[in-house]
Image (cartoon, rainbow, N blue to C red):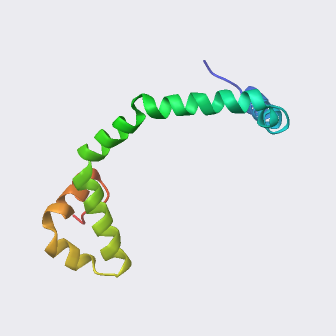
Amino acid sequence: MDLTEEQINKIVNNYKLKREKEKKHYHEVLKNNENFKENNRIRTKKHYHDGYKELKKEKYKENKDYYKALSSYHYYKKSNRLDYFKEKNKDKYDILVEKGVIVEDQ
């Protein structure tokens, strides 16, 4: 399905107009509606308590070493001692290389 430049511009402009209308509707109507606020709070509390906390805990546990390595990396980068980080924390360095945070020179 090939679209002309004119058709693409029309689609993009229609999308922008739609988003502007939705944003205006939220800020002028929904945001001030007490019923909307209450329903939104109930929905978010339900989302948070129905497993979201556990999902975040599991994700952190699975990636704990990565987060610790990343934190150490930023500390040493901030103090301009990345060579020391590489020597002292070879296992953390390897994790970051594996995840693609650090690109080794070939």
Judge by depth and name the residue closer to the eye, 5 or 95: 95
Rendered image quadrant of residue 57: top left
Q: How many marks?
A: 0
Judge by depth and name the residue closer to the eye, 31 or 15: 31
User: In the rendered image of this protein, does residue 86 appear above or below residue 20?
Assistant: below
| Position of residue 24 measured from the top left corner of the image (x, y, whole percent) | 83, 37
| Position of residue 100 measured from the top left corner of the image (x, y, whole percent) | 29, 54
| Residue at the top extreme of this rendering | 1
Q: Quadrant of the C terminus?
A: bottom left
User: In the rendered image of this protein, does residue 53 appear above or below residue 11?
Assistant: below
Q: Quadrant of the N terminus?
A: top right
| Position of residue 29 measured from the top left corner of the image (x, y, whole percent) | 84, 32
User: In the rendered image of this protein, does residue 22 appear above or below residue 59?
Assistant: above
Residue 103 seen in the current view: no
Rendered image quadrant of residue 95: bottom left
Residue 96 seen in the current view: yes
Name the residue rendered at 62%, 33% in the picture.
41
| Residue at the right extreme of this rendering | 28
Name the residue rendered at 60%, 29% in the picture.
42
Judge by depth and name the residue closer to the eye, 24 or 103: 24
Q: Could you tell whether 71 is left or right of 4 in the image?
A: left
Name the residue rendered at 34%, 36% in the picture.
54
Name the residue rendered at 26%, 60% in the picture.
68
Rendered image quadrant of residue 6: top right
Q: Could you tell whether 10 is left or right of 103 in the image?
A: right
